[in-house]
Amino acid sequence: MSNLEPITITALEHTISRCDKCSLSKSRNRTVPGEGDYNAQVMVVGEAPGSNEDKTGRPFAGRAGNLLNELLSSVGIKRSQIYITNMLKCRPPSNRDPQQTEIDSCEPYLALQISLIQPSVIITLGRFSFSNFFPGIPLSKARGIVREWNGIKILPVYHPAAALYNPGLKPKLLQDFQKITSLININESSASEQSQMADATQLSLFDGHFE
Ligand code: URA
């Protein structure tokens, strides 16, 4: 993260869209920087875009994304309330595992996203995402256990794509997602929703004033 200036999230997403720091830039169709609420309390960090994401430029746009939506709604969270991104912002060919050189090239973008959004909770999906924060701990031992990282609560869970291949993992994912409810106030609307509500209130007061 050292040689990147802190900027806005939109400027960062633009920088990512032009990135050619690793060879994935040659095979990708679209970069997938991330999407969601720039003031989110919760950030979700997956592994890398797949083919749907590479086509649309949106994270978790396919079947794993549908399961992610289901897991989020099981704890009353809407996708629009959180920020979703991946370790890698470009698709590895044939969805192979990310390589360490690719992770090293892309990691400064995630570090900047975290420092700009300042989430209080990060849900890591899968082992590559978890090991970015806590290297060397097997996910099978760590899943569902909240750890503190630089003042942020990290909740590691299995990757939803793993549960598509192994349906036995789905109950574990549902169980681990329940942990989020004690970490955040899910009834609290997101900061941007609150500011939109405040703007609407101001406008309606203003309207009344001139009636
Ligand atoms: N898997 C991921 O890790 N990220 C996506 O965006 C889609 C599938």
Image: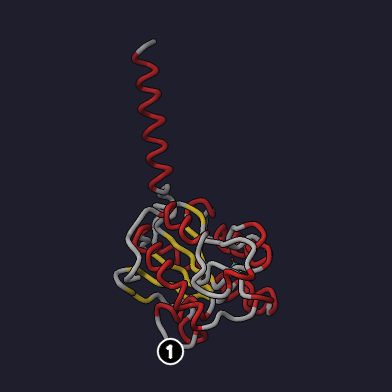
Q: How far across and how far down the image is residue 170, in percent?
A: 63, 73
Question: In the image, 35: left or right of 134?
Answer: right
Q: How far across and how far down the image is residue 20, in percent?
A: 52, 68
Toward the viewer: 96 or 158? 96
User: Residue at horizontal 29%, vertical 69%?
Assistant: 151
Is residue 57 positioned above or below 203 on the image? below
Question: In the image, 93: left or right of 46?
Answer: right
Is residue 130 positioned above or below 182 on the image? below
Residue type at numbered disc 1: Gly
Toward the viewer: 55 or 170? 55
Which corner quadrant of the figure contains ligand 1? bottom right
Is residue 165 positioned above or below 185 on the image? below
* Res 134 → quadrant: bottom left
User: Callout 1: few (<14), some (14-19), or many (20+) C-alpha neighbours within 10 Å?
Assistant: few
Name the quadrant of the N terminus.
Answer: bottom left
Name the quadrant of the C terminus.
Answer: top left
Which secondary structure, mark 1? loop
Q: How far across and how far down the image is residue 129, in percent?
A: 49, 76
User: Residue at horizontal 45%, vertical 62%?
Assistant: 43
Question: In the image, 4: left or right of 10?
Answer: left
Q: Number of callouts in the render? A: 1
On the image, numbered disc 1 is attached to which residue? 136
Residue at the top extreme of this rendering: 211
User: Residue at horizontal 43%, vertical 43%?
Assistant: 193
